[in-house]
Amino acid sequence: MATTTTAEPTRRDFLYIATGSVAAVGAAAALWPLIDQMNPSSAVLALASIEIDLTPIQVGQSVTFKFRGHPLFVRRRSPAEIATAKAVPVSELIDPIARNLNLPDDAPATDANRETHPEWLVVSGVCTHLGCTPTAYEGDFGGWLCHCHGSQYDVAGRVRKGPAPQNLEIPVYSFLSPTRVKVG
Amino acid sequence: MSGPSTYVPETGFTRWLDQRLPILRFSHDTMLTFPTPRNLNFWYAFGAILTFCLGVQIVTGIVLAMHFDPSATVGAVPGSSAAFDSVESIMRDVNYGWLLRYVHANGASMFFLAVYVHMFRGLYYGSYKAPREILWILGVIIYLLMVMTAFMGYVLPWGQMSFWAATVITNLFSSLDQVTGGLKVGSHIATWLWGDFAVGGPTLNRFFSLHYLLPFIIAAVVGLHIWALHVPGNNNPLGIDVKGPQDTVPFHPYYTAKDAFYVGLFAILFAVLVFFAPDFVGNPDNYIPANPLVTPADIVPEWYLLPFYAMLRSIPQKLIGVLVLGGAIVTLAFIPWLDTSKVRSNRFRPLMKQFFWLFVLDCLVLGYCGSQGVDAAVVGIPLVWVARLGTAYYYGFFWVLMPLIGLIETPRPLPDSIAKSVLGAAHAPAE
């Protein structure tokens, strides 16, 4: 009997697998803190919101604020700019989604879906290509031109020329009064 | 190839040591008597030159770390940071700090200059072909580690170019969002790399930690690279195998002396750069403290990454652009199997030789395109189209021409042996 080999798993096989499994789970558990320590810390996660006084901003002016470490553009659009932005059909856009955190994820990128009040555009200043800050009043669409890789945005912050894949993001914001806006 | 050891311990101590840790035997066999092809030319000195470069970077780097403050907290004047200030303090206050930093910063450029010569030399003489595939792949890994190390080092002074280079390169990962849908895997990787919602203080801290670590990883892979070199031995300009002792000379004193001579010449060029044009390869914008709200108008990487930058910029689609950029380096690892020719050296490959030099030119043209503005044009031709053509040739050279030419080309006849080729058939020692 002792010389015949059996295909049946033995108690020893079970112990091998069980020991190995415990070691694997233990190694993964030890690895996770080493990986997760690189994620934003609690202090960073304590999100801040900012309040912006709109009174000093002139018609046609684009002002840059700092919001959660990133630039934020607040642009007071002229009637001509608003008219140009509203005239663009969504079918002509590279990114047809509004990218407005105040609206549903699938809202179309009409100009109306890019603002709360037509005169005021509140938009992230982070190029959706590789994160540079685009320059205002440049490019062929009256909005912004990103000097890093040549992406262009219109006066509604919508991408009109690649390589950027998406419209500039619109953060959560609300008007506290006609001249005061809270972002975040 | 190295054969049985010829080491004979001569003292009582070395005999005792040799039976316990044969480190002297190993050094003797690998650095002194190692049989090396007798026909290695100038271009084979770059291995030694690169070892010199790595040594210079590690020594100056360790010293600079004693004076550098990897902190993005506000510095002495508004807008600057502790990191930026400490680099300025190295330049102005630390004894010989200006020299150490200029050697370290220009040392990176000299390192890349040497590695590109080394890589083109390997390409020209077919040094990647069997049995040296692993040797070549280890070289590609070293090159990749060098790029990572140089990039993280560039971030440390926390100037405008530092900050925006860090932003653009880490954002390369966000392109993965385009294939992972709502999961936004790419953005999560970017956030994980930053430790924040943008490049910031935590990013600087970790880049410093890794910038200090990676050179030692490079040194370890260099050890493997040299190990892999010492199994089949050196390739040579003829690309034919060593047939016997008449084809080789001992590494010492022949190549120790030859390498030392060329390291000396290289050091002169290095010194010219450091002492007469220390900011020649740098970008003046990096002497402006990092400003997260304003991207410099003309953002360009260091010269040694310009060809890859030109490829990225020439593709109008984000994910594809990033894949083309990464693929350009990954492609190098496949060369040993893409080249179908039985002949190693381009000296005997009349057709391949022409496409090789066209490839060298292509890399230079791509580099030029990368150095120019987004909308630049030369004699009316938009450079973005030149870069597209250049990118197509880069990929075409490796994935189409290399396999194809190996099949259709008739190579010139190879010499019988290294000794006959070098000494002439009449003077060659009997085989």
Image (tube, coloured by chain):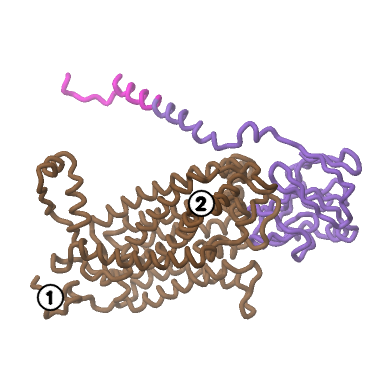
Placement of A96 over or under B260, stated as above or below: above
Determine which quarter of the picture holds residue B19. top left
Q: Which residue is mark 1?
A: B428
In the rendered image, residue B350, in percent from the top left (x then y), is placed at 34, 79
Q: Position of residue B194 (x, y in %)?
A: 59, 43
Could you tell whether B406 is left or right of B146 in the image?
left
Q: Secondary structure at mark 1?
A: loop
**CA–CA distance between discs 1 and 2?**
51 Å
Residue tagged by mark 2?
Answer: B153
Q: Are marks 1 and 2 on the same chain?
A: yes
What tint does the image give chain A?
purple
Discs 1, 2 touching: Cβ within 8 Å: no
Query: Which chain comes out brown in the rendered image?
Result: B
Residue B85 drawn in magenta:
no
> Which region shows up in magenta?
A1-22
Examine the rendering and report whether any part of residue B1 can be seen.
no
The one nearer the camera, B279 or B392, is: B279
Residue in the foreground of this view, choosing between B380 and A104: B380
Q: Residue at x 30, y 24 (%)?
A: A13
| Callout 2 secondary element | helix
* Relative side of B234 to B378, left or right: left
Q: Amino acid at mark 2?
A: Gly
